[in-house]
Amino acid sequence: MLIGEYEHSLDVKGRMILPAKIREDMGEKFIITKGLDGCLFGFSQTEWTNFEEKLKTLPLTNKNARDFVRFFLSGAIECEIDKQGRFLIASNLREYSSLEKDAVIIGVGTRIEIWNKEKWKSYNSSENISADEIAENMTMLGI
C-alpha cells in the first residue's frame, strides 16, 4: 500500500527522485497522468491495468464518460526509473500540475499523487480541509 508524504525537487530537465519506499511498490516502470485537484496521478503497471479496465467499461455514448477517459489517457506516459532513482515528468504534465521546482509525492493507497509544494500546502491547510467535516461526509459512503 502506498502511504506517506515526501518532499522532493525537480531538476532543470524535469526529473525527480522517486522515494525508495514508494519505488518498491511502484516498480521500475510506472504510469503518470493528469490527476484531479491539479496534481498528477502515478500508478504501478498493475494498478494502471486495473484502472484501464474500469475505463473500458464506461459507455462510449456518454459524453461525460468520453471526457473522463480522454482526460486520463491523453496525458498518460510510462516512466522509467534511472540508476539514480529519478524519473522524467513530461513538460505537458509539469505544466498541467504547475510543477517547477519543489514538489510533494504522497501515497494514497493504490496510487501516488505528485503535487506542486505550494498547491499541496494550500489544499492540505486547515482552512481547506476539516477532518471532522471529512469524517461526517464519509458516513454517506458507508465508512
Image (cartoon, rainbow, N blue to C red):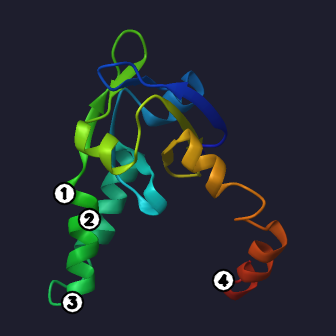
The answer to whether the residues at label 2 and label 3 have Cβ atoms under 8 Å apart is: no
Residue on which the image places disc 3: 62
User: Residue placed at 62% from the left, 32% from the top?
Assistant: 6
Residue on which the image places disc 2: 71
For residue 57, above or below residue 128? below
- Counting residues from the start of the chain, the first of labels 2 and 4 encountered is 2
For residue 25, above or below residue 84? below
Task: Give the residue at the far right of this rendering.
Answer: 132
Q: Residues within 10 Å of mark 2 (few under 14, many from 20)?
A: some
Residue on which the image places disc 4: 141
Q: Nearer the viewer, mark 2 or mark 4?
A: 2
Residue on which the image places disc 1: 74
- Counting residues from the start of the chain, the first of labels 2 and 3 encountered is 3
The answer to whether the residues at label 2 and label 4 have Cβ atoms under 8 Å apart is: no
Residue 31 lies in quadrant: top left
The answer to whether the residues at label 1 and label 2 have Cβ atoms under 8 Å apart is: yes
The answer to whether any part of residue 107 appears in the image is no
- Amino acid type at circle 3 is Asn
Q: CA distance from mark 3 to mark 4?
A: 25 Å
Q: Position of residue 96 (x, y in %)?
A: 33, 50
- Counting residues from the start of the chain, the first of labels 1 and 3 encountered is 3
